[in-house]
Amino acid sequence: MDWPIYYSSIFILGLAVGSFVNSLVWRAQKKAKIKEARSICPNCRVKIIWADNIPLLSFVILRRQCRHCGQKISWQYFLAEFFMGGVFLLSALLHSQNLVMPSLTFGLARDLIILAFLAFIFLYDLNYMEVLPSATIIPGAILLLISSALNLQSVISALLGVVFGAGWFYFLFIVSRGRWIGGGDIMIGFFMGAILGWPLILVAFFLSYMIGAVVSLLLLGFGQKTLKSRVPFGAFLAVGTVIAMFWGQRLLDLVF
């Protein structure tokens, strides 16, 4: 396959996955089934035709509003689609030893699946301050088994990552009696450990706490949050995990 077609296809796949994840976040919160009819406008409940559901393009053509009721469409949809296209493309580039002779590998396929789950975790926690077991524990366990079977990750490394990832948040949960963190963070810690392993889980944690601190200080400075406000820490963990997936080993090599 010619490299322009390959990378364009990966980018378009990312856009489609971003669109699907956006829809899945809303459906999961409303307890709607995936196999149900086409997506609907959350405001007027009218079914969205295929032409109005094209990633990025429909958002621009419709001028960020529903064709039927005129309700403004959240920027989340455009940004999530664009971001997923970008990280899918970035992942493909990082997995290609020769940029002009790319190849689809099991490692790339695994990472694209992980990115989709991380996007769901980020968006769901950002919108509803909640984490679902179906997006963390279950896929984490499955990905751990698949990665081990395909020799993409050491079993010992993955298990150490899980013990530390889930164990650290469980420790904080017990010590604070649930005041500092919730059970969702424990589930995300399990997922992070399963896909990153040891010691990349340490890099992800460090980055997540740093990003969370910076964002929280900015929100406090602009008066958007107070010291008593809750923050979607799961979203920060998802971002830290993505960075650790791509550049975690390089960061470790720089430090040690």
Image: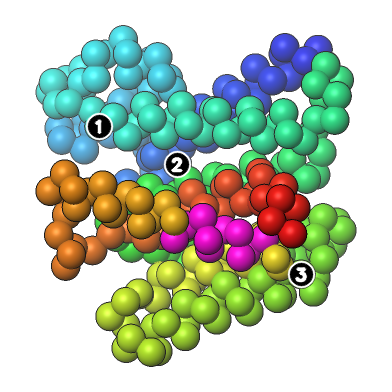
Q: Residues within 10 Å of mark 3 (few under 14, many from 20)?
A: some
Labels 2, 1: front one: 1
Q: Secondary structure at mark 1?
A: loop
How many numbered marks does the figure carry?
A: 3
Say which residue appears at 51% left-offset and 33% top-offset.
84
Magenta span dominant secondary structure: helix
Residue 60 located left or right of residue 15: left
Cβ atoms under marks 2 and 1 closer than 8 Å: no
Marks 1/3 in contact by CB < 8 Å: the verdict is: no
Could you tell me which residue is drawn at 41 percent across and 34 percent down? 80
For label 3, the residue is 157
- Give the camera-side residue of 123 and 133: 123
Residue type (three-letter) at the residue carrying disc 2:
Val
**Part of the protein shown in magenta:** 200-209
Please state which of residues 87 and 249 is positioned toward the viewer in this rendering. Answer: 249
Determine which residue is flagged by label 1: 74
- Is tag 1's residue or tag 3's residue first in the polypeptide sequence? 1
Q: Quadrant of residue 70?
A: top left
How are the residues colored? Answer: rainbow
Q: Which residue is located at x 44 percent, y 60 percent?
A: 209
- Measured in 3D between alpha carbons, the distance from the residue under mark 1 to the one under mark 3, in whole angstroms, is 40 Å
Residue 42 in percent (x, y) is at: 21, 38
Sequence-earlier tag: 2 or 1: 2
